[in-house]
Image (cartoon, rainbow, N blue to C red):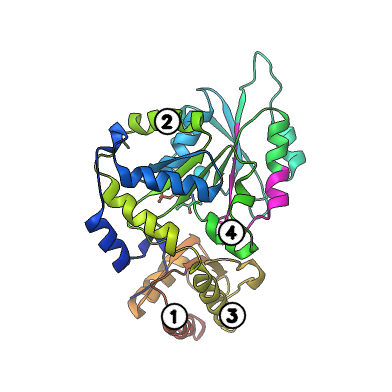
Amino acid sequence: MIDLRSDTVTQPTEAMRMAMAQAEVGDDVYGEDPTVNRLEIEAAARIGKEAALFLPSGTMGNQIAILAHTHRGDEIILDEDSHIFCYEKGGAAALAGVQTRTLKGSHGFIEPCRIREAIRDENIHAPHTGLLCLENTHNRAGGRVIAPDRLNAMADTAHEFNIPVHLDGARIFNAALALQIDAKELTEKMDSVMFCLSKGLAAPVGSILAGNKSFIGVARQYRKLLGGGMRQAGILAAAGLVSLNTMITRLVDDHRNALRLAEGIGEIGGLKINISNVQTNILIFNIDELHVDANEFLERLASEGVLAGAFGPKIIRFVTHKDIDLEAVDQAIAILRRTVHQFTAM
Ligand SMILES: *Cc1c(COP(=O)(O)O)cnc(C)c1O
């Protein structure tokens, strides 16, 4: 199977399994796991923040950020296509008790004037605007990156009103690599940042939430509240350290493979793809011209050996990762061509 559903399907490397087997561990709820402590220190340094917290998932990281930055009844501003709004089971409402004010962005960029308009006046009737959430790379925009000037323009607008900014940077290192900058340049103005170790960086489990010391102190308490306090978690953190230290620069291979896949798709009649949107390891394409919906198309692809996901009734998403090599890319293009042919030759 050529599994292009997500970079979350990556298998841990041999080096990770070795590091996990040998990890020095302790009880992390007591702050006594030396491997978790090391990961948190290294992760904070790499992302340019004072402190960091190791978490079971990226969703928990985003939800803890919302809990720690807001109060019940607040309103948070976010892109209508954001992961937090679309894919976290309504957690912002269910857990933090905040209401969401979604704005229409362009590939994750919301015009600062729109953000300004959405920020509430302090008034007895209105909810308090408690947080702005941003996402980079942007998943539903097909892995597009937001450059630092645009990211900072959005953050500056929130900060003018003393509203904190959280960055969902699940794939922040993909963004930094595509922009050829240090990830710190993307996080400098963010009050908190979440990134995943378990996606392209190939760790089996885990994400990081980073921010200043007092924010992480509060976040640590919310992690416990949500049941995310883990004990000898150094077994998992050991793999995360291998991710941070050895798996970031190789993401260029995933970007190159996504582009090659996109170029192949561009040559298949009946499929529509905007190649200039393929900037990292995600690509989305349209099957409007085929007499089939995304689910049936995916079933047919799976029966031929390619797994992918749907982003709409006529939109397919592919994600490249370390377990997809050039040969798999070329095979996927050939299978795609054959499958498309079945739905055009009718
Ligand atoms: C994957 C992802 C997350 C969090 O994912 P988990 O599966 O909970 O680790 C958050 N935001 C974005 C943009 C993502 O792609």
Q: Earlier in the sequence, mark 1 or mark 2?
A: 2
SS at mark 2?
helix
Where does residue 36 sit, x and y in percent of width and height?
34, 45
Task: Reply above or below: 79 against 299.
Answer: above
Q: Secondary structure at mark 3?
A: helix
Whether the residue under disc 3 has CB within 8 Å of ligand 1: no
> Alpha carbon of mark 1 to alpha carbon of mark 3: how far?
12 Å
Q: Residues within 10 Å of mark 4 (few under 14, many from 20)?
A: many
Seen from the viewer's position, the closer of residues 119 and 70 is 70
Residue matched to label 3: 263
Q: Amino acid at mark 1?
A: Ala
The label shown at residue 175 is 4
Q: How far across and how far down the image is residue 128, in percent?
A: 62, 23
- Let me know if residue 199 appears in the view: no
Position of residue 201 in the picture relative to residue 259 (left or right): left
As helix, strand or loop, the secondary structure at mark 4 comes to helix
For marks 3 and 4 on the same chain, the one whose residue lies earlier in the sequence: 4
In the image, residue 232 lies in the stretch drawn in magenta: no
Instruction: Point out the frontmost of discs 3 and 4.
Output: 4
The relative height of residue 244 versus residue 84 in the rendered view (above or below) is below
The residue under label 1 is: 332
Asked which secondary structure carries label 1, the reply is helix
Magenta segment, which residues? 131-153
**Disc 3 residue type (three-letter):** Glu
